[in-house]
Image: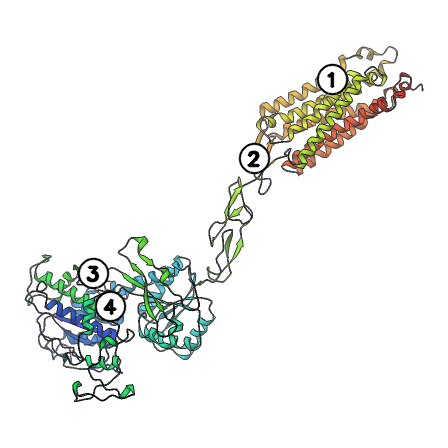
Amino acid sequence: MENRLNYGGEVAASFLAVLVDGRALASCKEEACGAPRFFVDMYQSILAMVLATEEINQNPSLLPNVTLGFRIFDSCYSESLAAQGTMWLLSGVGDTIPNYSCQHPLKMAAIIGDLRSSSSVQVARMLGLSRIPQLSYGSGLALLSDKHQFPSFMRTNPSAERMPYVMAQLVIQFGWTWVGILASDSDYGIQGSQTLREELAKHGVCVAFSVTLGEKISERKMASTLEVIKKSTVTGIVLYLYYAEASELMDTLAAQGVEGKVWIVSHSLQGTVLFFKENLQRLLNGSLGITIHKQESQAFRNFLYKPQPLSNTADIYRTAFWEHVFECRWVANRSHQNITEKRNKIENRICTGLEVLESLPSSIYNVENFRYSYYAYAAVYVLVHALDNMLSCNFKIGKCLKPEDFQPWQLLTYVKKVHFLDPAGQEVFFDDNGDPPVRFDIENWQVPTRGIGSSVNVGLYDERLPSHQILTLNRSNIQWGADYSQVPRSLCSESCSPGYRKALRQGQPVCCFDCVQCKEGEISTQTDAVYCVKCPDNQWSNLERNECIRKPVEFLSFDEPLGAGLAAIAVLFSLLTAAVLIIFLKHRDTPIVRANNRALSYMLLSSLMLCFLCSLTFIGRPVKTSCLLRQMFFGVTFSFCVGCILAKTLVVVIAFKATKPDSKFRGWLGLKVPAVIVLLCFLIQVIICITWLRLSPPFLEMNMRSSIGKIILECNENSQAAFYSMLGFLGLLACLSFLVAFQARKLPDSFNETKLITFSMMVFLSVWTSFIPAYLSTKGKFMVSVEIFAILTSSAGLLLCIFFPKCYIIIRKPEMNTRKHLQGKQ
């Protein structure tokens, strides 16, 4: 078998046709590739195909009795040359295509290539017309997965369609929300950057800027791009570029001393010569790159070190490769055994052929970088397994075919169905779009203190794994460069801590915001909360606004100064009332006590004592029973008290009227009339209270609306009409007492108690008239305090106004406590 590499020049991307008749012929028409450039990694892809072909032809279990051959056409990174090579391979012996009729009859099975997506698109459109299988080992453009446009295209490398998702996942894992994008002005860069922006937007990441660059950047475009990068506050920048587009820009950034940026590099740029430039080491230190998965192969590593420059005359690239990696030149018509001359200057150094490939650094000849070369290697095995299945009728698709009978379109069906383990131990198969499983390596460019950096694998993206394991990242192995000791931050605005919410800045992206503390009663428990959550009714926000805590329950307690003070006053006045009652009982036979109806005085003092004590039912934690009874207790005792005063006043008037001769009021003297009056007042109020309890009883309520941040434990009166009816009846009794006492104020001195009653009723009415607006304007425990204050004040007014002057006379002026004095005869 003869394997002729039949076109010289720039080795950028290999374009392969696989033959099954064992013949490989040289091109009859050569075209120049332009300026000579040599790409070692592309040359390694050719060697991978050579290795695969040799292994297959030596393997008796694959294509027995069939020898595999190949022809290689160098597309020179040119779409037009790729299309030209396709026509050259398809032309045959006839004159169907002008200037492409020089070939011998060949049996071509399929075409492997191209590396570049733009070239593969051109080739795939032509091959798709005849359904000739095409296997690319480097074209990642997502468009090529469209089987309607490219029915015969497949690839062994992963589609770049998932590349933006991997980049977005990296950005998200680092917590970045503010990034920049520099994209290639090609289908690859435009489509990829657009998908990346959409994916970032789904996760709340904003793009500060997105700039597209071509291979030739104008001075104006360069200046504007540099200005955008330098002025932007972003730390993380995604590079969706090819080497030709990135080289000049990165050189300029390094020359201008731009620092503090972390670059995330797509697979089109990662591992290129850009990373081995000495002037870019500081700029690229700590950058992260996404590359197609690297496959280890000791056999390929040995194969790369095996050949010598003149050992394989069929390899026309070998001498060019040798000159490139060893920076020497071959002298015409001299064998390497006779070369002994060496010169100091590199451009004049002569190649001896004795140079050792193992001595080359990885930056020049990287035998560990088994990436595109592996997929070229795998592409050959895919075609061989498809041929083997077709010739051995494994799938029984149609009739069994012989090597000389099949057509390429028949092989396409078998190529789609391949599923095997290659010699490297990797499972090879295609999905419905002709794409293999997606696997990417995450690499970190780490630069030592001095010298050129190296790429360190820090993660893997493998869509064959469960969803939670698709992206694995070893953060401890990542070095971020000299500017950062930990994961750098790339934010437009610092994150809002719990207790705050984001308030967007007008006219700016959603990632630019201010942090506003939640209002009282609202909290946020997450970082960067969009809104605050209202606490439940029985809870309130803490000072930090990050937790709902139970609202303090508020009521007038005996433990607080206000409650304790009011309780003390109530007890003190009740004791004082008891003391007055004792005084009256002790001096019950004295004129001043007897003159004012002793029985009514005793009842009035007793009811006043209960009035003071009823205020204690308003203090302390309210319960259901206290809510039901306290207003009733207050209303009934005060009605009894005011009824006694009314009875005392009427007794005075009746007594005065009864002194006249033949007065009909004489029959009203005695205890019957006062008792009836007091009992009537008492019973009416009892009826009002029972009706209240029966129809709309008070109840215990946890009021969460009246006071912010508190629960007011209070007794809800339930019926305001009933409450004010009770107070209204008390007011009516007080008014009657006042009017009667006022009318009797000019009676003789022996009946001067009406003056005291008149003044006491004025105090009573003033207190309860002021009580209503004060009661309605306060809330919570202060509302209760107002009612207690009114009870104590009005009760104290009655006690002091009616009984203090009498006690003064009994204790301090006993000489005035005589019948003659009371009758005004002294």
Q: CB of mark 3 within 8 Å of CB of mark 4?
A: no
**Image location (x, y in percent) of residue 669:** 80, 12
Q: Amino acid at mark 3?
A: Gln
Choose the circle earlier in sequence order: 3 or 1: 3
Which mark sits nearer the N-terminus, 1 or 4? Answer: 4
Q: Amino acid at mark 4?
A: Phe
Q: Specify the quadrant of the image occupied by residue 700.
A: top right
Residue 364 coordinates in the image, percent (x, y): 28, 76
The secondary structure type at the circle numbered 4 is loop
* Foreground label between 1 and 4: 4
Query: Which secondary structure lies at badge 3?
Result: loop
Lateral position of residue 139 relative to residue 208, left or right:
left
Instruction: Name the side, left or right, on which 334 lies relative to 489.
Output: left
Q: Is residue 463 left or right of residue 562?
A: left
Colour scheme of the picture: rainbow
Residue assigned mark 2: 702
The residue tagged 4 is 370
Looking at the picture, how far across and down is residue 373, in whole percent?
22, 69
Q: Nearer the viewer, mark 3 or mark 1?
A: 3
Q: Earlier in the sequence, mark 3 or mark 4?
A: 4
Q: CA distance from mark 3 to mark 4?
A: 13 Å
Identified at 74% across, 18% down, the residue is 603
What mark, if any, has residue 677 been given in the picture? Answer: 1
Identify the mark at residue 47; answer none if there is no mark: none
